Amino acid sequence: MLYDLPAPAKLNLFLHVVGRRPDGYHLLQTVFRFIDLADCLDIDIRRDGQVHRETDMRGLLPEQDLVVRAARALKQHTGTHLGAQIRVRKRIPSGGGLGGGSSDAATVLIALNRLWNAGLSREDLMRIGLTLGADVPVFVFGQGAFAQGIGDLLTAVELPQRAYVVVQPAQSVPTEGVFKDPDLTRDTDPVKITDFSGRSSDFGHNDLQAVVVRRYPIVKRALDWLDHAGFPARMTGSGACLFIEFPDLAQATIAHQKLTAKMRAEHSVATGVNAACPVQALMVSNGLAEHPLRQWIES
């Protein structure tokens, strides 16, 4: 059995929508960065061939759960007669644009590849991951990455050490509606990886952010709340989570303390839907140089 397997969250340091394919999929450019905010998984071999999962997410059917789908996809690909018992402890907010479900699925693929002695390469696992969702391959790729296409064309980038305050607004955002919005910008000029080289979250923008703040007022209030506190933030993915970048963990921790005090003070006097503080949670995270399980896979 493998215990406490990390499934780290990701940030999109920028996210440009540069086009749309005839099949409706959007063409993106983004840089993915892993952070040490992570779900934890325990995985054990089952000899009866069944795939079962235990999770603290209520209302999520096994057939809808990416960890179950990932295990079954790997099982089908390898033809193994083994199964898996998977326990998931969620720490990454759902519906936040942090890639928690995709990361969980990637950790399942990486771990079961080892537990089942499947011997698949990184490229094999990335191809399986892509059938589960566009963000799954980058977690198998295991490095900070400049992504193009639908997010599946990946080039490794070396990112400077940074720390982040991740902000969870008191609202979740369904991804599908954001990408279907007629006002979404879909023609941002493409950039080159050399344009980004050596830079971090001051580069570019997130094309989805304008749609989200229009459709979800609490996200806009959270951005304004942070800005008024002196901490301009950017949205990751399709939202709702926001992030503020700092040179190191010490500075991020100081900002977290200031914002936590402000949040608690406003929550203590607020009532009802018009509560003064639009922020539900604040988290401090370090940027990661690579996925913690990256070395588990033969390239």
Image: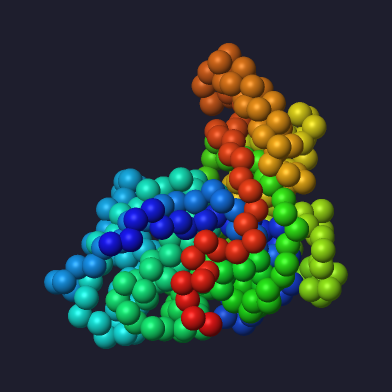
In the figure, 96 relative to 154: above or below?
Answer: above
11 or 212, nearer to the observer: 11
For the image, the number of numbered tags is: 0
7 or 235, nearer to the observer: 7
Q: Quadrant of residue 275?
A: top right
**What colour scheme does the image use?**
rainbow
Is 70 on the left or on the right of 100, as rendered?
Answer: left
| Residue at (34% x, 82% y) in the render | 118
Is 209 on the left or on the right of 284, as rendered?
Answer: right
Residue 135 appears in view: no
| Residue at (65% x, 66% y) in the render | 144
Residue lying farthest right?
A: 195
| Residue at (32% x, 65% y) in the render | 68
In the figure, 87 relative to 268: above or below?
Answer: below
Residue lying farthest left?
A: 48
Residue 64, horizontal then vertical, whole percent: 34, 62
| Residue at (58% x, 39% y) in the render | 283
In the figure, 220 relative to 72: above or below?
Answer: above
Residue 48 appears in view: yes
Q: Quadrant of the N terminus?
A: bottom left
Q: Quadrant of residue 72?
A: bottom left
Residue 274, horizontal then vertical, whole percent: 58, 24
Residue 178, horizontal then vertical, whole percent: 60, 57
Residue 157, horizontal then vertical, whole percent: 72, 70
6 or 283, nearer to the observer: 6
